[in-house]
Image (spheres, helix red, strand yellow):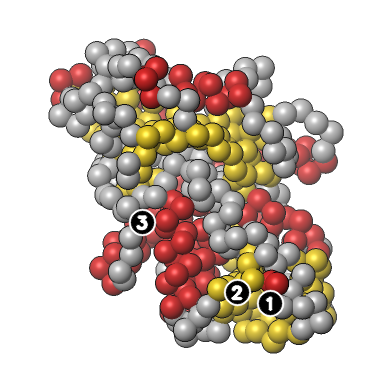
Amino acid sequence: MGYLMSAEKSTNSQRHKVDILVIGGGVIGVTAAYYLARAGRSVTLIEREHIGAGSSPGNAGLIANGFVLPLAAPGAIAKGLKWMLRRSSPFSIRPRLDMDLIAWLWKFAAASNEVQMRKSIPALLLLGQSSLDLFENLHRRENVHFGYERKGRLVLFKSEAALQKWEADIRLMREFGVELTLHDAGGLRHFEPNLSPQVQYGLYCPAYAHLDPARFVQEMARLSGENGAIQMTGVSVKRLECIGNHISAVHTTAGVFAPNQVVLAAGAWSPELAREVDVRLPIQPAKGYSLTFEMPSNGPHFPLQLAEQNVAVTPIGGLLRMTGVLELAGFDPSLDHHRLEAIRRAAEGYFPDTDKWGAGTPWHGYRPMTPDDLPVIGRSAKIRNLVFATGHGTLGVTHALATGKLVSQIVADQPPLMDLSPFQPDRF
């Protein structure tokens, strides 16, 4: 039986000999710990704050296995330049003299082409489908309670002109085998009877599921502990020490860990730790925003995408969460209230009486974005006992279980459940 302990119960003089050390207690770290522990490995997970302290409490909670166009796509640069001057835009870059940001933007521009996009889409779809299959298996096998529902998702359009802007993307997704059905105003009301009369079309994608992301992280942490994983919170990594091409010691505020293997799952903070072993990860912290409301009486039954506003709406138990906006502004903790107001006003025209929904509870978190919008999953080519599981961007919940399963296979040198070449750490 594993257990959760605080760094207060440890001292800096202690030396911990461990088999697998997982760095990061977010959605990727706890799922990796779960699959490693289930495979019979001795696992210790360390987290500098508390379990689920990162993006878990406020994200959309979607298992987005369907309409997954990478952010790096043709026209992304021109669109980004246009959005840069709009404080309510869905994606923005705060200009600053930062060489890591400049290098990231250069790689992003290089990845924003038709060829790379067509390589990325099947990789994302396969990773998403594998994760969805694992969610179904998890529910059959384990006693878990995190509000998992497989109902699909609706993209809503208020005009034919808005729908036409999506037509090329719809054709592309169907080309890759994604099931999408288009509904007119009448058919749409069979899904969502409370929609405003302004909503004219809806695109239904049945492959989506959704859950309560905060509860999901806590449940996976509980299951990993029940399978024997040790979880230590309030533990910060101070430095990594190498002998040759192996990490020999991880110096932390709770002492020194001597691991056989290290799994780096620290999200947006992964690059600064990778630098300790002279590995460069082109990951930028993209600040995401959300507002959470008490579920209104006319609230939605299905997860939604408000097409004209680029805002996601998810029913999570008795709550309603609206998420939108990615802001490349570094680790800036401030809340841009113009962006929050844009999210709050996004539902106007889709549902009546949205002014009665209240102000909502604001949140922001840092999403680890790679230039090609694909995660980094695999063993380091330079440090042979280091495995990366990071860079999932906005799809951390979506890809968590598949990533955790892959990590357990990589650590054991087993054949992975899919081709890992699109996600290799050295692809940059």
Q: Amino acid at mark 2?
A: Met
Q: Residue at x 36, y 39 (%)?
A: 319
Q: Amino acid at mark 3?
A: Phe
Residue 22 image point, x, y percent = 61, 71
Disc 2 and disc 3: Cα gap in Å?
23 Å
Regarding residue 261, the answer to whether it shows in the image is yes
Residue denoted by label 3: 146
Regarding residue 416, the answer to whether it shows in the image is no
Cβ atoms at labels 1 and 2 below 8 Å apart: yes
Q: Amino acid at mark 1?
A: Lys
State the image quarter where residue 19 is shown. bottom right
Residue denoted by label 1: 9
Q: Which mark is residue 160?
A: none
Residue 58 image point, x, y percent = 50, 43
Cβ atoms at labels 2 and 3 below 8 Å apart: no
Residue 93 appears left or right of 238: left
Q: Is residue 107 above or below residue 163?
A: below
Disc 1 and disc 3: Cα gap in Å?
30 Å
**SS for callout 1:** helix
State the image quarter where residue 167 is shown. top left
Question: Which one is nearer the viewer's eye here, 404 or 225?
Answer: 225
Residue 291 image point, x, y percent = 48, 33
Residue most extreme to the front: 8
User: How dense is the environment of label 3, judged by Cα within 10 Å: few (below 14), some, or many (20 and up)?
Assistant: some
Q: Is residue 328 above or below residue 316?
A: above
**SS for callout 3:** loop
Residue denoted by label 2: 5
Q: Nearer the viewer, mark 2 or mark 3?
A: 2
Question: Which one is nearer the viewer's eye here, 353 or 175?
Answer: 353
